[in-house]
Image: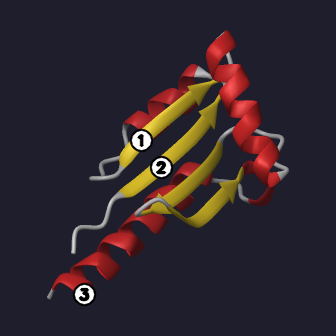
Amino acid sequence: MNHVIEVTVTIDSTYQYDKVTSIESEAYFTIFDERYKKGKKEAWALKNQYAAQQNPFIEIKINGKYYTAIYSEATQDPFGDLEKTLKKIDKIKDSLNS
């Protein structure tokens, strides 16, 4: 079975953009940048669903279903946590496919 991993990230700086785009993964990434009008509206809508306030905020879905969210309010290194989570998902996918 082919599992689709979707990662949605809200950002508000070039540093955050560079961090998220440097992550190597087969996941599909959507980035909402609050520095731009359209990105701000979509980022706030996503963060409001989870009562998150700070950027970056990261939502991960597998096959369209919620898997986890990573809050800046709860971690010092959200992008490091994202990389660890994606590696964990890859290991789970590999074990399911073997």
Q: Residue at x 77, y 49 (%)?
A: 49
Q: Residue at x 30, y 67 (%)?
A: 3
Residue tagged by mark 1? Answer: 29
Q: Sequence order check: which comes first, mark 1 or mark 2?
A: 2
Q: Please give left or right for residue 44 compared with residue 16 in the image.
A: right
From what the image shows, is residue 9 above or below residue 44? below
Q: Sequence order check: which comes first, mark 2 or mark 3?
A: 2
Residue 53, position as x, y percentages in the image: 84, 41
Residue tagged by mark 2? Answer: 7
From what the image shows, is residue 70 above or below residue 37? below
Q: Residue furthest toward the left? A: 98
Residues at circles 1 and 2 in contact by the CB criterion of under 8 Å: yes
Q: Which mark is residue 95?
A: 3
Q: Residues within 10 Å of mark 3 (few under 14, many from 20)?
A: few
From what the image shows, is residue 10 above or below residue 86? above
Q: Amino acid at mark 1?
A: Phe
- Please, which colouring scheme is shown? secondary structure
Q: Residues within 10 Å of mark 1 (few under 14, many from 20)?
A: some
- Look at the image and tell me in which quarter the N terminus lies: bottom left
Q: Amino acid at mark 3?
A: Ser
